[in-house]
Amino acid sequence: MYKLLLCWRYLRTRWIALASIVSVMLGVATLVVVNSVMDGFTTLMQERMHGILSDLVVETRSTAGLSQPDWYSDRIRERLGDSVSGITTVVTLPAMMTFTVNGQSHTQQINLIGIDEATYASVSDFSKYLLHPDNQKQLDFLLKETGYDPSRESLQPAGWEHRRPNERLKKEFAKRQQEFRSELERYDELKRKIQEQQSEQKNENNLDTASDEAKSEINSLETDPLALAANSADAINSLRDSKPLSAPTGGGRSFDAETEQQIGIVLGIGLGCVRGRDQDNNVRDHFYLRPGDDVSVAFPNAGTPPKAIDKSFTVVDFYESKMSEYDATFAFVPLRSLQESRGMIDPQTGKGAVTSIQIKLKQGVDLAQARDILRSEFPPESLVIVNSWKDTQGPLLAAVALETTILNILLFMIIAVAGFGILATFFMIVVEKTRDIGVLKALGSPGSGIATIFLGYGVLLGTVGAGVGVVCGLLFVWKINEIARVIEFITGREVFDPTIYYFDKIPTIIHPAMLVWVSLGSVIIAVLASVLPAVRAARMHPVEALRYE
Amino acid sequence: MSKILNPVKNAAVAGADSSRYRVVGVDGDRDIPTATASAACIIKASGLTKSYRKQNVVVPVLRGVDFQAEEKRITAIVGQSGSGKSTLLHLLGTLDQPDEGEIFFNGARIDNVSARERDHFRNTQLGMIFQFYHLLPELTLLENIMAPAMIRHGIFSYWKRRSELKERARELAAVVGLEHRLRHRPSQLSGGEMQRTAIARALILNPSLLLADEPTGNLDQETGTSILGLLQSLNEEHNLTIVMVTHDEYVASQCDALVRLKGGRVERLK
């Protein structure tokens, strides 16, 4: 009883102990905050990754793909049974996207994914990341009139609302260009005639025979404002070489881009938008591509050797998974049209080959076990690769896990430093309490009892420090966004730049188990730090302790 | 586990002559030797030698001391500074162990037992008071008095008996005249009050023997006389055996027996 009483009294009366408590508290609070934020980041990242990736992927690297996807799907369903929640077939291939902005051509490397819009939603959360609410319900790769996330002002206008006037303008421009080209051709013809006449005159030394009519024609052309504007030889030459800005044609029929669309393509938002800051330092998205714009995509066909195919698509929507890696590379097109373009359709059966089969498992099914079952079904020798989404993102997840581990080790080292503070404080207290230790021994307290006082004191310091630290850490996590704003105000620097991190609030998750092990770890460190002083106190000779000055 | 029976109220407060300090087990099955009415020897030492090593120099303090104290009497140990008075008291109180010699308490040897047994012996059979009182500054007067009882009992045992023990501590505080200062800390007490508190603390577990190391040495004459009077009354009224180290010849003259030490040897016995 005296041990408990003295522990409590030492805690209340020795202000030096407060320093130990504060050091433990700070360490624990920091650990709680860091772990909560790291867990928040990791979980959000995993959710986003898993949102766009299916649970399991059976894929081939063969250019021609898996020619009998139904056979594979049946085998998968047979082996996994009720565990399967959804299956879809996909064609994935690297491609090059080209588009024109302000008359300049831009090229971007992309991952072109052909999806079956009817079944793809059953294996991933793909549709919930689309901007148009109708597409979120069911994607049909058709351009919508309007309604692409009205909250994004910089995206408006989009859809037919954007395409129609844009294409009308293009058509008008093409018409003017055509007229101008005709004028140029006429000018070239006349110029050629004059040159011929001049050469004839030189030969005959008779310049007067030049046609007055032709001369006056040239003069009228040279004073023509259009001709003057095109005075630069380079400009004229480039215009001569350029193709007319007419819409691509399909099947020989004239294509009217003002009323028709190409095959739809859904682009990752990073492919059509850059995020930056305006003059007032507000974060703004600048869309250089919008739903309604046409892009050209070059990709290899399924032949051997593969040949490049160039195909036009109309952007029908963007998707934003907030994973920059996906948002900046993925582009989705209808599976059937991609199969047709690549020559993956079997002319006899009419069935298309695919490069991968994506599988969604039911809630609670062991992912690794299901993967291993499929791996045994499709061994590597069959040139089919089976991976879970965690395998696909393994290096990234491992890097984040490693980062979290290293941070935890470093922060526990900070608490260990606090532990040395406790050690020093306790040695001071033991020296200060030497006489009291002697008195307690004279009154019959055993050495173990004396040691227990100081060990108990360590437990108490650790517990109070950890308890207050957990509370402070939780408060910090609770108000982390407000605190971040205060820090931004003081330092003038953004803590989490929204142009880099795709979130408007700092994600945090508090796991009760984390709180327990952080607190327990701190208490253990505090107790370990008090062992040496406690042993020293226990071994003190009572007579020497009583005589201590 | 043990239970303190309460003879003090009857003995010290009511002054009953039947007082006897007894410590028995909870189940009452273990009687520890106690002072009796006859003048038997309660503690006896023979051939005690003790030396200390200071910077590789051996300094002999006791050079073969024989000592004995009889029950219900006050025995004074006197001598000059460095004569070995306090060392002898520490050996008798098992705070230290002799290099040679033997110490018996009620016929049982106590100098060669284990540290745990010596701790238990000090806690249950001895009361100790010191020149500098040695109260625990973090505890109140009441808690200081109860300290040996807290050491004796575990948490649950103490919790079960806390009201009984508190009552006993209050009674002892009343015996030493400090019943109105129970919640005060040692820093709020005078020297005399602190020594009275130390005496009450020494008596909480009904010890068979009270060892006092210059109990008046740090007090003014009037307060010292009052403390001495208190010890004498405890001895007379409650038959408490006291062994007291003092350098004050007057104090020594008031005791029943006297042992004078000189140069680590017993010079004269009264």
Image (cartoon, rainbow, N blue to C red):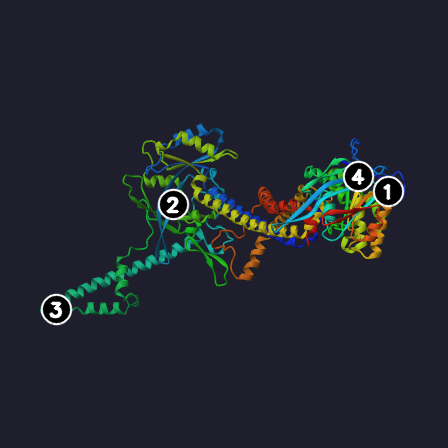
In the rendered image, residues at marks 3 and 2 fall on the same chain: yes
Q: Quadrant of residue A79?
A: top left
Q: Amino acid at mark 3?
A: Gln
Q: Mark 3 to mark 2: distance in Å?
A: 64 Å
| Residue A427 coordinates in the image, percent (x, y) | 62, 51
Q: Which residue is mark 1?
A: B238
Q: Which residue is mark 3?
A: A201
Q: Amino acid at mark 4?
A: Ile
Q: Which residue is mark 4?
A: B42
Query: Residue shown at 12%/68% (left/top)?
Result: A201
Q: Quadrant of the N terminus of chain A?
A: top right
| Residue A335 coordinates in the image, percent (x, y) | 39, 40
Left/right of residue A93 with respect to residue A438 in the rendered view = left
Question: Label 3 near label 1: C-beta < 8 Å?
Answer: no
Q: Which residue is mark 2?
A: A111
Q: Mark 1 to mark 3: distance in Å?
A: 158 Å
Give whichever of discs 3 and 2 has the lower sequence position: 2
The chain identifier of the residue carrying mark 1 reads B
Query: Residue shown at 83%/55% (left/top)?
Result: B223
In the rendered image, residues at marks 2 and 1 fall on the same chain: no
